[in-house]
Amino acid sequence: MRKKIFLLATLVALFVNTANAQFKKGNSVATAGLVSNLTASLPVLEGSYERFLTDQVSVGGVVGTHLNTFALYGGAKGSFHFLKTDKYDVYIGGKFGYLLGKSISSLLYTGHIGGYYFFKENMAINTELGYNYAPELKLGITFKL
């Protein structure tokens, strides 16, 4: 897994041109996506909102539901955006919150590395590779607000 993260960061670094970065202080993004991990038979439906406090730091909230158990979760999300071009944005960060369901109740904490690929000025494909209790991969669509 570390090799994949290193490879992704290296490939993106080869194309870095920070002159036209996508996000600046005060920008906001909303993302909807599906999260898949090794322990669940169905994906997790997740939505998030983040606001940029600086050109590199974003904070916001995240909500989701496990489709196989109908457990709900919610919490805070923060990211540090370290590689930015006019089309790409790569970041690391984490989520902290609470998971609540019929047969489960626990704290949620996840670390992640992710990125946006902007195919339109205000729309991007989002992907995150994270780890909570199992490796997880998120694929989603992001709207720059």
Image (spheres, rainbow, N blue to C red):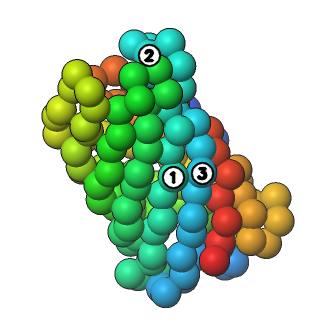
Residue in front for this viewpoint, 94 or 75: 75
How far, Cα to Cα, is label 2 from label 1?
18 Å
Q: Which residue is mark 2?
A: 40
Tell me which numbered mark, 3 or 1, is placed earlier along the sequence: 3
* Residue under the image location 18 percent in, 32 percent down: 105
The tag on residue 47 is 1
Tell me which numbered mark, 2 or 3, is placed earlier along the sequence: 3
Q: Tag 1: Cα neighbours inside 10 Å, few (<14), some, or many (≥20)?
A: some
Tag 2 near tag 3, CB within 8 Å: no
* Residue under the image location 40 percent in, 35 percent down: 130
Can you name the residue that lies furthest to the front here?
Answer: 102
Residue flagged by tag 3: what amino acid is it?
A: Ala
Q: Which residue is mark 3?
A: 32
Tag 3 near tag 1, CB within 8 Å: yes
Residue in front for this viewpoint, 140 or 16: 140
Pinpoint residue 40: horizontal percent, then vertical percent.
44, 16
Tell me which numbered mark, 2 or 1, is placed earlier along the sequence: 2
Q: Which of the 4 quarters of the picture holds residue 34? A: top right
